[in-house]
Image (cartoon, rainbow, N blue to C red):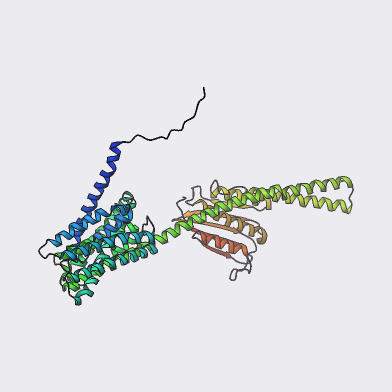
Amino acid sequence: MSSQARTVAYEPALDPAAGLARPARYAAGIVALVAAYYAAAKVGQAVRYTGSVAAVWPPVGLGIAALYLFGLRWWPGIFIGELLVNSELLFGSTPLPLGSMIGQQLGNMAEIVVGAVLLRRLIGRRSALDRADEVSGMLVALGVAAALSATVGTISMRLGGVIDTTEMGSFWRTWWLGDAAGAIVVLPLALTWARDPRAAMRRICTVEGVLMIGSVVSLAALAVSSGKPLTYIVFPALIWAAFRFGSTGSTLSVAILALLTIGITADDLGLFSKQAIDDRTLGTQLYIIVAALTTLFLSAVVSEREGGAHQLAAAKEREGAQALEERHRIARDLHDSVSQSLFSALLETRAAQKALGYDRPTQIGCTLAAIGELIRSAQIEMRALIYELGRDPVEHGLGAALSELARSVGKRERLPIELLASSEPLALSPRMQAELYAIAREALGNVVKHAQAAEAWIRVGSDDGRVSLEVADDGVGFEVTTEPEGHFGLASMRSRALEIGGSFRIASTPGRGTIVHVDVPADDGD
């Protein structure tokens, strides 16, 4: 009896509840989007230019944000919300012609869809608007989309007899600026806060955040409600938000400013309300746009600077790790090549001495003995170098590293070196400790090579948020008014100090020794 293998395709059991849940969630999302769009339209309708054009139109920013963040499949929510808003105009006290309303509906829908598509093309899928080029890309997308809606809407109103030909220019400008102002307020707020609402809220819900928001509210209200020219008194608070809270605080501050401006002007209060309708609309639009652009670009520049600083710190950390790995590689190579060659040379020298006879004081014998001593000395130095390259000198802290340095150099060079260090741990990051250790090692090397000193000192301590390092000797000194030309050691020490934000100076007098002093800011040790 033969058997035959069969392959059966696996078909998961269908869950009717799960199948119904997806359309239900989608329908609930559409309803929520319609409600949000309609509410945003009511805010924008608080300040009108004509019966159909608002001074600021927030729904366009909400619609573009929804399609940009969640996909174009949510367009029915925008369509229904826009239809509800337009139906009020169609059946209101001053109804729009049906053709004009249809043109407005299609133009606004095209604006939102085109704006979302352009936004994805220009700034990517999940932008936080934390770079100036992203803010610029957003402005291009919004400008093109708003121009499309303004053009279609203006033509529709003209064909429907709502406006005259002479009014088309100012009508188009008001429509374009109104949509652009609404989008530039709502869209950045949505993009910034939608990424991580909890993190954004935690950043704002601090003492400084509450003070900043309070300042924006009070100064914005004063700027708009006062009949005197105080409109730009709110800008210091907006700058505060951009510098200290990034896009999270800046977008929220701009939204608060726009909401107060619209609300106060709608109640016929403040400087804008005293102007003619054309000037009132234009002033409101430009005020909101200028405030938003200034705050958004400033926030982006600050974010770029902070990002650049973090990238530089990370690059330096990687560079330090790579340098340590390279030191280990060099140590291994020296051990496997040069160190073994020195050992072989010493064996050959001893063999030659043995062949000649150790007790024969010939010139060749003396020469071989000297060569042997030189090779042994080279071996000692090579072992010390391999040991130095193969370890992290500040693994146990700067104080322990300097103590070992003073002991080893003093023993090798027969030079008394005193270490004066605080017993308290120093608030320094590993990188700063490594750089200070390298400076001390270079300074002691200069003492050994050039100072002809009888004694040397290393002092390290902290005071008032600063850490200082001194390497001093009682040697011959030198004139420091002009640094010795080609002195790489001094240039290297100065460069290391500057790289960690410190200061470097040398005090020396011929015949009275030298002091190398480095002062750096204390670090958190991260």
Can the viewer see residue 468 in this picture?
Answer: yes
Q: Looking at this view, is 345 or 41 the one in front? A: 41
Residue at far front of view: 1
In percent of width and height, residue 505 lies at 54, 64
Q: Looking at this view, is 230 or 450 the one in front? A: 230
Q: Is residue 1 above or below residue 413?
A: above
Q: Write down the quadrant of residue 66 in the picture.
A: bottom left
Can the viewer see residue 212 in this picture?
Answer: no
Q: Looking at this view, is 178 or 131 the one in front? A: 178
In percent of width and height, residue 280 lies at 19, 71
Residue at far bottom of view: 166
Quick check: 51 left or right of 61?
A: left
Q: Write down the quadrant of residue 473 in the picture.
A: bottom right
At horizontal 59% and vertical 62% (from top left) the residue drawn is 492
At horizontal 41% and vertical 59% (from top left) the residue drawn is 306
Q: Looking at this view, is 425 or 421 the one in front? A: 425
Residue at far left of view: 93
At horizontal 85% and vertical 47% (from top left) the residue drawn is 353
Tally of marks: 0
In percent of width and height, residue 524 lies at 45, 51
In percent of width and height, residue 285 lies at 24, 68
